[in-house]
Amino acid sequence: MTGSSKSAGADEMATESSHAKSRRVAAGSPAAPLAPIPAFKYKLADGRQSHYGCILLEDQVFHCISDGDAFFAALGYTGEFRKSGLLLDEFLWERYQRQGAPKSAQCLQAQIAAYLHRHSAKFQKTFGRAYDETIGKCLSDRIDNGDDHCLQCPRHPQFAY
């Protein structure tokens, strides 16, 4: 995936949420309080399963991952990391989970939510409005404008409306 297509996707998400907000304001109805997007976990599948794993909500399967590469890319694990020999679990530990990691646990959750927003109708139906409200509102203390993946995150402040 090239940088321009990533940017286009993020721009589309920002535009979608702006339109959604405009419709709510135009309708004149006050926005109901939104339930926050919960913390999701992921579980990678073993080779005997037909899908690549699943995303869990409260230990229940919320979404089956049918395209592992799309999920891994959403977390920032690119072909470059794969070619370097860095395994996905090692990458996630180094990028999001170890003490002093360059990205935070909030960043990992934002990336999982962005993946679900693109790939799960159930997520869109259940948390779509709440997701729209997170566009441009990063809660992490580790915003890095030199990191392409961070810059493409829909919660990056550049997408604030």
Image (tube, grey):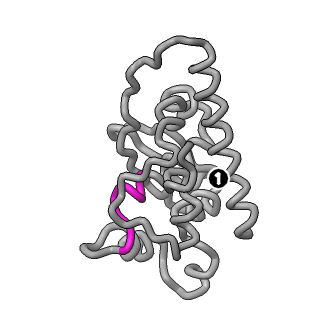
Outermost bottom residue: 84
Q: Position of residue 130 (x, y in %)?
A: 47, 32
Magenta residues span 102-109
Side (left or right) of 85 relative to 41 = right
Q: Quadrant of residue 100?
A: bottom left
Q: Quadrant of the N terminus?
A: bottom right
Residue 107: within the magenta? yes
Is 118 covered by the magenta stretch?
no
In the figure, 29 relative to 67: above or below? above
Q: Main secondary structure of the magenta part?
A: helix
User: In terms of depth relative to the viewer, which is nearer, 54 or 99?
Assistant: 99
Q: What residue is pinned by disc 1?
A: 10
**Circle 1: is it few (<14), some (14-19), or many (20+) Cα within 10 Å?**
many
Q: In the rendering, at what x and y percent does residue 114 appear?
A: 54, 48
Task: Identify the residue at horizontal 55%, vertical 51% (top origin).
Answer: 154
Residue, x 41% and y 69% (percent of image)?
92
Tell me: 125 left or right of 62: right
The number of discs equals 1
On the image, the x and y values in percent for residue 125 come to 56, 26
| Depicted 23 relative to depicted 64: above or below | above
* Residue drawn 58% across the image and 71% down it: 148
Relative to the observer, which residue lies in front, 111 or 139?
Answer: 139
- The answer to whether residue 49 is visible is no
Work out whether 59 lies above or below 75.
above
- Whole-percent x and y of residue 155? 49, 51
Quadrant in which the C terminus appears = top right
Q: Secondary structure at mark 1?
A: helix
Q: Can residue 66 be seen by looking at this rendering? A: yes
Q: Amino acid at mark 1?
A: Ala
Which residue is drawn at the image coordinates 53% and 86% (left, top)?
A: 85
